[in-house]
Amino acid sequence: MSAIEVCGLRKRFGEVDALDAIDFEVREGEIFGFLGPDGAGKTTTINVLTGLARADSGTVRIADIVTTWRPRAAQHLFGVVPDESNLYPELTGFANLSFCGALYGMRRREREARARELLETFGLTDAGGRSFEGYSRGRKRKLAIAAAIIHRPAILFLDEPTTGIDVVSTRGIRDLVRQLNASGTTVFLTTHNIEEAERLCDRVAFIFSGRVVRVGEVGELMSEAAGRNAVEFALDRLPASLAPQASAAFPGLECEPVSRTLLRVSSLGPVKIGPLVRWLEEQGFEVGEARRARPSVEDVFVRITGIVAGAMGESPERRESGA
């Protein structure tokens, strides 16, 4: 069953097609990633789906409700975590949650019990009595998610949930998303973070310049990208001269540095590890590990769009709309 269906959705800002007749479906119970560089149309899409913006044409269906011209008709079915917090800085965490519960029509006893439950679940009990403005960025993100699900929605929209927060908070938020999904919540996640999409999502849609260029299951897209065989070698050091030397020593292999100590060797045919390890050791390098490298969502993204993920500047849509 579909949680969200989008058909022919268009949105223009002046002369710019922010959304150019996009189509996709989000299945009930999945984590669906909406992946693209800054300004590709991700925020515009989530704004239209959640009723913050109105499409110029096309159809949006959430559950069994067509919301294209009635943007508020399905608001009770979902929660939204925008890229910038919309909670009140002067209120405590508990008061913010209780207020959000009131907006959804929850009775006082019910919303306060739910607020305490969520503070405990999200590890925020000790911060519940403090003003929101004093929270760390990671804790602000957690409370924003708690506020979005206080009414137990079937669908959760997350717009760039881990942007600008530390590694520990990022891991905690990803764990929360997994837990929410395991409990039955459908998650629509917009991100430009390739790793985040790969770690969390069941399926992803790639959007670029306002167009959805591909939708598919993560495993399926990974298999598609596996056109080359690759092996990564963890070395004690990796001078800039090593990759071209290795390519020259082994014609038919493409060698490139991945990090300061990781060398990737790829080929259309099989990559034989033994000769490479012996050659590297003969050159005076210590090989700590050699492992088969699987393709990433980034490989798929580059192959489909022809751009390097993260290399795009702001698009005209972002300059026009702030999306």
Image (cartoon, grey):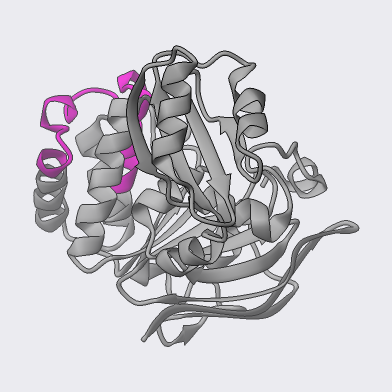
Q: Residue at x 34, y 77 (%)?
A: 28
Furthest residue in direction right, as rendered = 15
Q: How many marks?
A: 0
Query: Within the magenta stretch, is there residue 133?
Result: yes
Q: Horizontal placement of 307 versus 142: left or right? A: right
Residue 323 drawn above or below residue 74: above
* Coordinates of residue 20 in the picture (x, y in percent): 76, 69
Query: Within the magenta stretch, is there residue 161?
Result: no
Residue 204 drawn above or below residue 244: below
Q: Residue at x 46, y 13 (%)?
A: 237
- Towards the viewer: 203 or 320: 203
* Coordinates of residue 268 in the picture (x, y in percent): 59, 56
Q: Residue at x 48, y 26 (%)?
A: 279
Q: Residue at x 65, y 51 (%)?
A: 302
* Coordinates of residue 139 in the picture (x, y in percent): 29, 30
**Where is the N terminus found, in terms of image quarters?**
bottom left
- Res 132 seen here: no
Q: Which residues are magenta?
A: 119-146
